[in-house]
Amino acid sequence: MEPAVHHIWKRFFHRLHRTLILPKRNHSRHSEHVAVSASTQSRCIKPTLLVSRLYQPSNLRDVGQDSRLAGEMTCKSQRLMQQAGLIHPANPGCYYYLPATVRSMEKLVRVIDQEMQGIGGQKLDMPSLCSADLWKTSERWDLMGKELFRLKDRHDADYCLGPTHEEAVTTLVAHQATLSYRQLPLLLYQITRKFRDEPKPKFGLLRGREFYMKDMYSFDVSEEDAYRTYKSVCQAYTRLFARLGLRCVQVNADTGNIGGTLSHEFQLPAEIGEDRLLVCGDCSFSANVETLSSDRTNCPQCKTGTLVESKGIEVGHTFYLGKKYSHIFKASFSDPQNKPAIAEMGCYGLGVTRILAAAIEVMSTEEGIRWPGLIAPYQVCVLPPKKGSKVEDAAVLAEELVHTLGEALLQLRGEVVLDDRTHMTIGKRLKDANRLGYPYVIVAGQAALEEVPKFEVICQQTGETTFLSKEGLLDLLGKVETV
């Protein structure tokens, strides 16, 4: 017994020694480590946004190795977005949106929110899973045909994945029994995933089966007020595309299976576009060829102008619906005489992911992406010299510049990245930066080591290269608008 007891006490004192003594030693080493780290940080500020840490796996970008994918690169935006690691195919018409794309899309959503809320829009979110009963009530369950993704639940009830939400929003408003004319116009919108069973999805994000869309629905007291709201939304769309620097044409369009009596498309002119447009050279008239005879050459508006055919990518669509849905679902309000009246409706769509792809399609070169500056994933990329080069000392200046830009220019916080892959040459990293489309690329090279340090600044939109001091850079980038 005694040897056993002795052994137990020996183990006890050994553990006590480790508990009381060793942590003090570890704490001492930790203090030394913190002191060294703080000292190192004081000499060299480490930026938080490093290209090496951005999730853009190179194997997802090399579409050339997959002959099937290479054969599907039928438009510039799809090829550029996959080569840049912005999207990755999941299944036909569906894509992974990688972090840089999500950043750009979130910025676009903020711009859309600003414009929609600027005209009184209120944001909500409706279910993607829609009851077939609603669609059968509006008679669109059969009308939409195979375009609807249809499914049954465990109780054998029919549903669809919503491609649009006229039925759902009208039902929602109809359930409000106390709606007064004083609360109109009512503009409700959402930005969500939509689903359409395209027979042949193509062109990347330009024609997919799963995509993001902004859809807004208006409810008005009278036809006159509804037209006023319709015009207001169209003007907001025009401002939106102007802010993005995109040339957009508003054209007369067919109402299709949405219905209504008035419709306009917002088209970005592009050779890859699937819509054929007729545009007058003398006045503001323009129309989708679906609304006119394709062989018509004289303008129906000014009578003297000649219609010229071009192609476009549809990025927005507006409809004046009248009482098509509000009558079916009994979406009514109390008029000034406190009597029930049926609301006049409109609906208005914007293809969020399509705008991203269409902007890249019309603005980019064959070698690299050019974003609308307002929605570029990141505004600035700073390139330090290659490790081991004659100008390696400029690396510290590059890191300090990233910190300075974020501190001095509040709108650029979180917008400046450092390409820390210094095992690569400047040339290779410049090629990558061009492919990804940073609006401004700054190189810290030989000029940064001169008595008055200067940085090489490349403006991707114009292709111009200049050499600026830190003060000149702050002045230039201080004018950059972010959202």
Image (cartoon, helix red, strand yellow):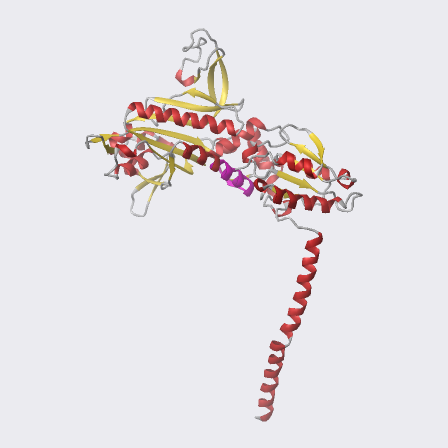
The quadrant in which the N terminus is found is bottom right
Q: Quadrant of residue 360?
A: top right
Magenta portion: prevailing SS class: helix
* Front-most of residues 50 and 362: 50
Please tell me which residue is depicted at 56% across the width and 39% down the height of the picture: 377
Please tell me which residue is depicted at 61% across the width and 45% down the height of the picture: 407
User: Where is 296 relative to 89, above or below?
Assistant: above
Q: Is residue 246 left or right of residue 153?
A: right
Q: Quadrant of residue 367?
A: top right
Please tell me which residue is depicted at 44% across the width and 31% down the height of the picture: 350
Q: Quadrant of residue 150?
A: top left
Q: Is residue 451 left or right of residue 457?
A: right
Which region is colored magenta?
Answer: 93-109
Q: Is residue 82 left or right of residue 198?
A: right
User: Is-magenta flag for residue 129?
Assistant: no
Looking at this view, name the residue that lies furthest to the right: 390
Q: Residue 57 at x, y = what percent? A: 60, 44
User: Is-magenta flag for residue 102?
Assistant: yes
Q: Is residue 168 visible?
A: yes
Looking at this view, name the residue that lies furthest to the top: 304
Q: Residue 352 at x, y = what percent? A: 47, 34
